[in-house]
Image (tube, grey):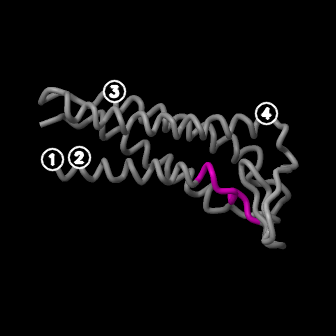
């Protein structure tokens, strides 16, 4: 049981780190023709990054930014709640609060990455392909769901 909890804790920390990288890095879309990438915050070329995104004023991008930031916040809160519950909760109880907070994180990732997918991922035909930040977002989606369900199922022994 201790090994399982330690494994979940390590995966949770990895998910937090990947969420930070996914949200901060500007590699959500990568150009096939030139050495350039587009992120949530900046438009980058091989020389420099500029703050001018062609769609920066769109509400969809602001929504994606907000939900990705919320997912980081909820993931960190869930990790802190898990550590708190680990040391204060009585034996035999379940990690309901940690699981619920992680599933809220999962929902925020789902909304953010899905909106990005529907609005921006397939723009300009085949000129762009998905970057590692976009893929990390979907990986974090899977990890946070698995962690959330495991928190809800596990009991402290």
3D distance between C-alphas at marks 4 and 1: 45 Å
Dot 2 or dot 3, earlier in sequence = 2
Cβ–Cβ below 8 Å for labels 1 and 2? yes
Sort mark 3 into few (<14), some (14-19) or many (20+) by Cα contacts within 10 Å: some
Going 39% across and 50% down the picture, which residue do you hit?
Answer: 13
What is the distance, in whole Å, between disc 1 and disc 2 at their CAs? 6 Å
* Sequence-first disc among 4 and 3: 4
User: Secondary structure beneath disc 1?
Assistant: loop
Residue 23 vs residue 126, the one in the foreground: 23
Closer-to-camera residue (148/88) = 88
Q: Which mark is residue 59?
A: 4
Image vertical order of residue 8 relative to residue 87, above or below:
below
Q: CA distance from mark 4 to mark 3?
A: 32 Å
Res. 28 image quadrant = bottom right
**Which residues make up the magenta segment?**
22-30
Give the residue number, with chain letter if any, for mark 1: 1
In the image: residue 42, left or right of residue 7 = right
Residue denoted by label 3: 97
Tell me, yes or no, whether the highlighted magenta stretch contains residue 23. Answer: yes
Q: Is residue 31 left or right of residue 12?
A: right
How far is mark 1 from mark 3, CA to CA? 19 Å
Picture coordinates of residue 145 (x, y %)? 42, 42
In the rendered image, residue 70, in percent from the top left (x then y), is placed at 56, 34
Quarter-of-image position of residue 123 = bottom right
Lower position in the chain sequence, tag 1 or tag 3: 1
Residue at 69% x, 47% y is 117
**Which residue is disc 2 drawn over?**
5
């Amino acid at each position: 049981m201790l090994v399982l909890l330690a494994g979940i804790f390590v995966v949770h920390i990895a998910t937090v780190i990947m969420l930070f990288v996914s949200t901060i890095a500007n590699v959500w879309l990568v150009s096939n023709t030139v050495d350039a990438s587009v992120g949530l915050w900046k438009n980058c070329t091989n020389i420099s990054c500029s703050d001018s995104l062609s769609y920066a004023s769109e509400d969809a991008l602001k929504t994606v930014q907000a939900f990705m930031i919320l997912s980081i916040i909820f993931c960190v809160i869930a990790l802190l709640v898990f550590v708190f519950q680990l040391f204060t909760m009585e034996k035999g109880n379940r990690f309901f609060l940690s699981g619920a907070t992680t599933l809220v994180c999962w929902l925020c990732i789902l909304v953010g990455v899905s909106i990005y997918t529907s609005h921006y991922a397939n723009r300009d035909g085949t000129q762009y392909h998905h970057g590692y930040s976009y893929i990390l977002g979907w990986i974090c989606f899977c990890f946070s769901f698995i962690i959330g369900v495991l928190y809800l199922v596990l009991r402290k022994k």
